[in-house]
Image (cartoon, grey):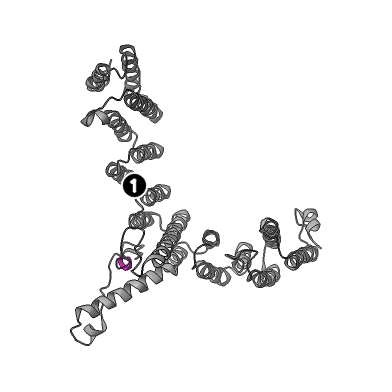
Amino acid sequence: MSDKARFYLEQGLPELQELERKKIFTKEEIQSISRKRSYHEHRIAAARCKPADFLAYATYEMNLDALRQKRTKRLSIRMRGASNHLGSRRIFFIFQRATRKFHGDVQLWKTYAEFCRSQKSYGLLRKVLDSMLRLHPTKPDLWIYAAMVAVDDNDNMAEARSYMQRGLRFARRSSKELWVEYAKFECMFIGKVAAKTATILGLETGDAPDPNGLNFDDIEEDSSVTLEGDDTALSTITESELNGETEPPQEDEKLKQKLAEQANKDVLEGVIPIIVFEEAIEAIPNDPSLPITFFKLFEKFGDLACQKKLLACVDVHLMTTYPTDAGALLCHVRETLAGIQVADAAFPAALKIAFKRFGEARSKAEDKKTVYNGFVGILGDILSKGSSAEGGLDESLEKAVRLFLGRIIKWSREDQVELPNASQVAQFAL
């Protein structure tokens, strides 16, 4: 037996003796535990040790601790003080040893972080995330993971925003995924602010608090986006100060309230996601797939009041920069239909605009086949949604869609574009 393995095994003897003394495990079970631990300690002490060996050891200890807790509860045995946390402390120590030895294994770090989350050890979790990001600063998925943890566990958008901005310092011009995920977090934040605002306005007349537990008085500072490490904020200058006057305290409070309301309004109008989009386009230019990905992201947030504004911003950029790209033209067609249900009164007018935009797109597109297939898919979705909607799709509207499908088949022949599902499309056309 190696000296290192013997040392760590001896550290666990008092715990095993207490478990036997309190009859949580029998003598035979204690011996089995000792053998298992000896096996794992020798595996991780070997020269050819792998990360999987540490994970197997940690998994065994997790299962053992879960069994201990069940038996303790069933036997009504109280484990006092540190004794009740010896199992989790041992697992933490295994992960610490693993990440010190294999600090380049990202999956090992994530498993360690997930165990901290399961134990609600948020102080240690923060240290684990900081160490992981310090060792792997150029991996966007880790910054996204850290931001997700901040939002899911602590509902802390300020911390999540900090992680995303720090990640962009290392991958500003290389990671489209990081930019898009940052915009996604900001859209989620808008949804939470809107929901909280609606709740408060329905119950009381006071200002609605921010989901992070902040007042909207604080939202001006919290919502600032600094993508290049520039955290400088301009101080507020009142009209009285410009005139050299001394403003009464109550007037200052009124101005502060107005500024806070304006900041809240800016957040709900989608100012931050638009800034993120514009910065992303500046950082990664000449790549039509990036704005198209942003467009698809904003399409998913149909419950946001600012969705039309977000989509319009991306649409203008696409039509200005990539007027003949098939993907951009399809986004231009879909933009008018976004956020409108087939049963809405505004849907027929929106569909008419979409028909017109498709007619323009087929004449501009370099890749006509993609435009045709994409629009056929849009019309197919409308028919399927209409059949499942309450009351079904309006009869005249359904007729218009089927007539247009027939026109698409005719145009595809004129443009010498072969539709892969032409026979299926013809069945739905009039």
Element at label 1: helix
Q: Is residue 19 above or below residue 358?
A: above
> Magenta residues?
216-221
- Tell me, yes or no, if residue 49 can be seen here: no
Q: Nearer the viewer, residue 134 or 187?
A: 187
Residue placed farthest to the left in the image? 246
Mark 1 = which residue? Answer: 133
> What residue lies at 26% left-to-right and 27% top-to-bottom?
78
Q: In the visual, does 394 lie left or right of 160?
A: right
- Tell me, yes or no, if residue 393 can be seen here: yes
Residue placed farthest to the top in the image? 28
Q: Nearer the viewer, residue 316 or 18?
A: 18
The spot of residue 269 in percent (x, y) is 44, 70
Q: Is residue 128 above or below residue 80?
A: below
Q: In the visual, does 2 lie left or right of 197?
A: left
Q: Is residue 183 above or below residue 47?
A: below
> What residue lies at 36% left-to-right and 53% top-to-bottom?
155
Indicate yes or no whether the magenta region holds residue 200.
no
The spot of residue 11 in percent (x, y) is 22, 22
Which quadrant of the view contains residue 383?
A: bottom right
Q: Is residue 155 above or below residue 90?
A: below
Sort mark 1 into few (<14), some (14-19) or many (20+) by Cα contacts within 10 Å. Answer: many
Question: What is the three-letter code of the residue carrying label 1?
Answer: Leu
Which quadrant of the view contains residue 320?
A: bottom right
Q: Which part of the image, by quadrant, shows the C terminus?
A: bottom right
Indicate yes or no whether the magenta region holds residue 220.
yes
The spot of residue 233 in percent (x, y) is 28, 69
Q: In the visual, does 208 lie left or right of 234?
A: right
Q: Which part of the image, by quadrant, shows the N terminus?
A: top left
Number of numbered discs visible in the structure rendering: 1
> What residue lies at 51% left-to-right and 66% top-to-bottom?
307
The spot of residue 319 in percent (x, y) is 58, 71
